[in-house]
Image: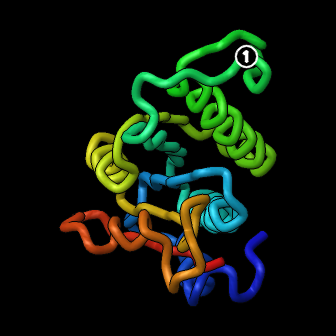
Amino acid sequence: PLEKGDGGGFEQMIRDAGQGGEKMIKKILMASDGSRTSGRALKVAVEMAKKMGAKLTLVGVIDNRLYVGRTMPAEVTPTRIAEPVEDYLMQVAGAYLAADARRCKQSGLKPEMVIRMGHPVEEILKEARRSKADLLVMGSHGKSGIGSAMGSVAFGVLQNDSRVPVLVVRK
């Protein structure tokens, strides 16, 4: 359940969501990176999806700009075989999205999971358009956040000319 203060003032909107009328939000896109803040945002997205009867899509983005063509040493990979960094990061993203999906299923939701490669801001916005999301939910700081008021990915998504409303859940 949503705890007081978790939704940044959206608690009343969520409580009122399922009380008749046409659904405003039918598809929610939840951007996840496996961070603690992302987990808080997932909690809000799940509660909103349940109350609004919306479909939930989880998206993870592998920022491959720095890793193209490199390999991971065998001793750090799950398969114990040297593999391209992209493959390793795909496994990591798959693992945290699967954990998020299990949390959703415990609440009675069956989310779609999507993993994209590229610049996180661009890929999150592309997925929002592709999935025709009515709302994008994300944490204010992810794994790349370095103590500023807002993480670079959340800031980039908010600064972009997106037609999808964005709910940023703070850490």
Name the residue tied to disc 1. 74
Name, please, the residue furthest toward the left.
Answer: 161
**Residue 14, placed above or below residue 99:** below
> Where residue 117 sits in the image (x, y, percent)?
40, 35
Horizontal side of residue 132 vs 59, given as left or right:
left
**Residue 3, placed above or below residue 125:** below
- Identify which residue, 138 or 155, lies in the foreground: 155
- Residue in the image at 67% along x and 45% along y: 109
Kindly tell me whether residue 168 is visible in this rendering.
yes
> Where residue 95 sits in the image (x, y, percent)?
70, 34
Horizontal side of residue 156 vs 162, given as left or right:
right
- Identify which residue, 57 or 74, lies in the foreground: 74
Name, please, the residue furthest toward the top.
Answer: 81
Display colour scheme: rainbow
Name the amino acid type tagged 1: Ala
10 Å neighbourhood of mark 1: few (<14), some, or many (≥20)? few
- Residue in the image at 68% along x and 58% along y: 35
Kindly tell me whether residue 51 is visible in this rendering.
no
- Identify which residue, 75 or 155, lies in the foreground: 75
> Where residue 59 sits in the image (x, y, percent)?
50, 44
Horizontal side of residue 105 vs 148, given as left or right:
right
Quadrant where the C terminus is found in the figure: bottom right
- Residue in the image at 26% along x and 48% along y: 129
Query: In the rendered picture of this protein, how many numbered marks are placed on residues?
Result: 1
**Tag 1's secondary structure?**
helix
- Residue in the image at 49% along x and 72% along y: 151
- Identify which residue, 90 or 114, lies in the foreground: 90
Corner quadrant of residue 69 = top left
> Where residue 82 sits in the image (x, y, percent)?
65, 13
**Residue 53, placed above or below residue 149:** above
Quadrant where the N terminus is found in the figure: bottom right
Corner quadrant of residue 50 = bottom right
